[in-house]
Image (cartoon, grey):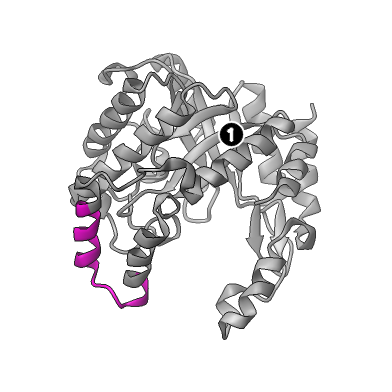
Amino acid sequence: MTKADIDYIAAQGFNCIRLPLHYDLFLTPAQRAVRNGVIRGTVPYADYVAKLREWQQKGELFRAPAQLDAIKLIDKTLAWCAANKLYVVLDLHAAPGAQGTDSNIADALQPNDFWQEPIYQDITNGLWATIAQRYKSDGRIAMYDLVNEPNNVPGGNAAIHTMLERLINTVRAQGDQHLLLLEGNGFGNNYNALAKSTFTHSENLVYNAHRYNMAKYPLSNALDASNPDANQLGTIGNLLAFRTAQDVPVWVGETGENTPQWMGEAARNLASVGIGWCHWTYKRFSDKPIAALLRIKPPYLVDVKSAAELPQILEDIKFKNCVPNTEVINALKAEIKK
């Protein structure tokens, strides 16, 4: 992600970006080397967890925020976005220990350890305390997305509630009143047992849906489409009913991965009832048109045979070398510009 990317997003008419963050970026190089050792098979997973406990107990995690890669990235992005009058949502996309079983969106060393190893929620709590201390007065940030897409969670929404209650209280304890985006089980869509009234700090909470239309789970864009479970928020009808019943703002934190026609209709219908949305995703590897705004041309990382080929991969993902998916962009711009 570079300034050219942010300039382009703003030029299309968007007013916000959701910045996905992997907790790995909040580690120091030395700490990250231990985690990388697990990935490469040179460090046992149990040894890594033990090191995390040691770093946590000694106060060695997030000790110098300004020196961490994640903070440098956030600060750059905030500056670029402010110059374009774009808001930023800070999204903990991959929480430590994996917040579910889907390896595409998780710290996939061990599925669901976020819920099974207490150290991981301790670390997440410290991470949000660090972010809140640094950015509590920063008006460039629209929201904090506390934990992205919990899924297949042991203990279900009761476990999610306990985690969210802790994180909300921690952020507020820093004097930070930013909007907090909540995500329930089922990839951020189910809110059973997560009513606003059940949280100690119930102010400035935003409820979220991730809307994808898939063959296995078809999703209509009709305004009156509904699900029998009132707390399942994928349909627009349920979003509207939940917003009214709970007296809370709702936001579609992710939508996309479909035809231009479906995505354009979704944007149009959501706008007609005052529900904001964020397109997923911005860039994706592909040699043909796809649902992302831009596509990255081959060769891809999976094709790399040696470290010598990595510079070309990094060059190819730069904005100047990506190809716009014009049909998708035009379908969305037609609704954004209204």
Estimate the x, y position of residue 202 in percent, counting from the top left.
Answer: 34, 17
Q: Amino acid at mark 1?
A: Val
Residue range highlighted in magenta: 39-54
- Quadrant housing residue 270: top right
Residue 53 is situated, as x and y percent measured from the top left of the image, at: 20, 52
* Position of residue 151 measured from the top left corner of the image (x, y, whole percent): 34, 48
Residue at 45% in and 60% down: 104
Identify the residue at image location x=80%, y=44%.
330
Q: Is residue 178 left or right of residue 51?
A: right
Magenta stretch contains residue 238:
no
Disc 1, SS: strand
- Magenta highlight: main SS: helix
The residue drawn where x is 72% and y is 46% is 3
Horizontal side of 1 relative to 12 (left or right) equals: left
Residue 193 vs residue 219, the one in the foreground: 193
Label 1, residues with CA under 10 Å away: few <14, some 14-19, many ≥20: many
Q: Nearer the viewer, residue 263 or 222?
A: 263
Identify the residue position indicated by label 1 in the image.
88
